[in-house]
Structure formats: structure tokens, C-alpha cells
Image (spheres, rainbow, N blue to C red):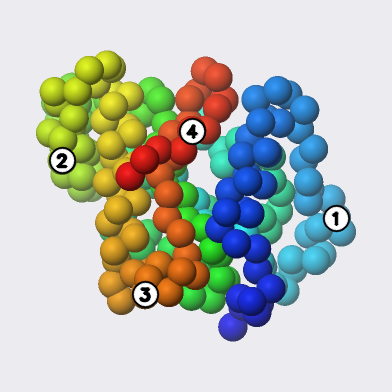
Amino acid sequence: MGPDANKRPTAEEVLEKLLEGNNRFVEGNLLHPNHCQESRQLVMHQQEPVATILTCADSRVPPVDIFDQGIGDLFIVRVAGNIIGDHTLGSIEYAVAYLHTPLIIVMGHSSCGAITAVAKGASLGGHMATLAPPIQTAIKNIKDAEGDLIENASKEVACHIARNIETSEPIIADFVEEGKVKVIAAYYDLQSGIVSILPK
């Protein structure tokens, strides 16, 4: 089993820490914590990440850098379009059940290639086709909203997936109901570097 959950920071404390790190990232005042040999040794036999982050596989969206964290700080699950399936949900379940991460962040981002492709009606062959349904649902939900379609869809995908994770049974929904885990949606702007918290 992982560390004692009673000694872990709260979701609110973790979020504050991550947003402070994001502010350093935006301002170019990175601390690069937990990147040394000592840090590697400390987590060699046991990890105690403070948050689980589901985000896009996009190479421009590196959560450790965006939140100015280091080795062992974040449990990161990445897939194009930051959508969920059995494997991604299983990974998130592991993080909350065994690593006791109190915070799950679903983070979409600007200029998402997967969302752009689906929005433009591109033909996704092979296994790429499995990415489309949740993105298509998000696009339907916001098709009449004002503003940029891709940006709106990216935010809606993050919110939609966060809601699905929050209610995912049996494991995550139980942790959420017990107040041990909080699930939030966020949006990363590639140009500014800013992470915004989204209302679900």
C-alpha cells in the first residue's frame, strides 16, 4: 500500500501549490524542485505524488514543467484529447487507491490537434477513431456557444471527462463521496502558459 492518507495534503493545498508553480512557469522563475540525485534516491522505492493529472499526449503540454514540479510529484496519464477509457481509468484508480493522490486534474489545452481534427471532420483511421466519440459529444454540447469552436470544445472535453471520472464506479466515485478526492477540470493556454480552472 501507499503512504498513510492521513498525512497527505488536501486537494485544496495541492491545487494552490500547483497554481503557484504554474505562476512561476509563466513568469520564467522556475525552481525545478526535485530534479537532483537525492530526489531520485528518495523516490526509488516508493512514490508519493500529490496529484493525478490526465492530459493530452501533445508534446507541448508537459505537466511537470507547466506546474514547476519534479520527479515523484505528479502521477501523469496522457492520451490524445485527454479522454478516458478502461486503461486510463484504471491508472487513475490506482493513483487514488494506492498512492492516495487527493486531487485529479483533467487538463485540456489550446490548439489541440485531436479536437481540431474531429471538429474539421477529418477521417481518423485505425485506433485513432476511438478518440472521436467523446470529442464529438463535446462539440455538440457547445456548438451554439460564442467564441472559438476549438477552444470551447477543448474546455468542454476537459469538463465532460472530469465529470465522468468523478462519477466513475466503483473506486473513484466512492473516494469523491467520502471527501478523499476532488476532481477538477483545467485548461492550459499554449501561448501564455497559464492554467485556468474550469467550472464543471
Quadrant location of the C terminus? top left
Residue drawn at (55%, 27%) of the image: 194
Q: Which sits earlier in the primary sequence, circle 4 or circle 1? A: 1
| Dots 4, 1 in contact, CB < 8 A | no
The image position of residue 124, as x and y in percent, is 19, 35
Q: Secondary structure at mark 1?
A: helix
Residue 174: mark in rendering? 3
Cα separation between marks 3 and 1: 37 Å
Separation of residues labelled 4 and 1 (CA atoms): 32 Å
Q: Is the C-beta separation of discs 1 and 2 under 8 Å?
A: no
**Residue occupying image coordinates x 36% and y 40%:** 199
- CA separation in Å, label 4 and label 2: 22 Å
Point out the tag, 4 or 3, that comes first from the N-terminus. Answer: 3
The residue to which callout 4 is attached is 196
The mark closer to the camera, 4 or 2, is 4
Label 1 sits on residue: 37
Q: Which amino acid type is marked by label 3?
A: Asp
Other-residue count near label 3 (Cα within 10 Å), few / some / many at <14 / 14–19 / ≥20: some
Label drawn at residue 137: 2
4 w.r.t. 51: above or below: below
Report the number of numbered marks.
Answer: 4
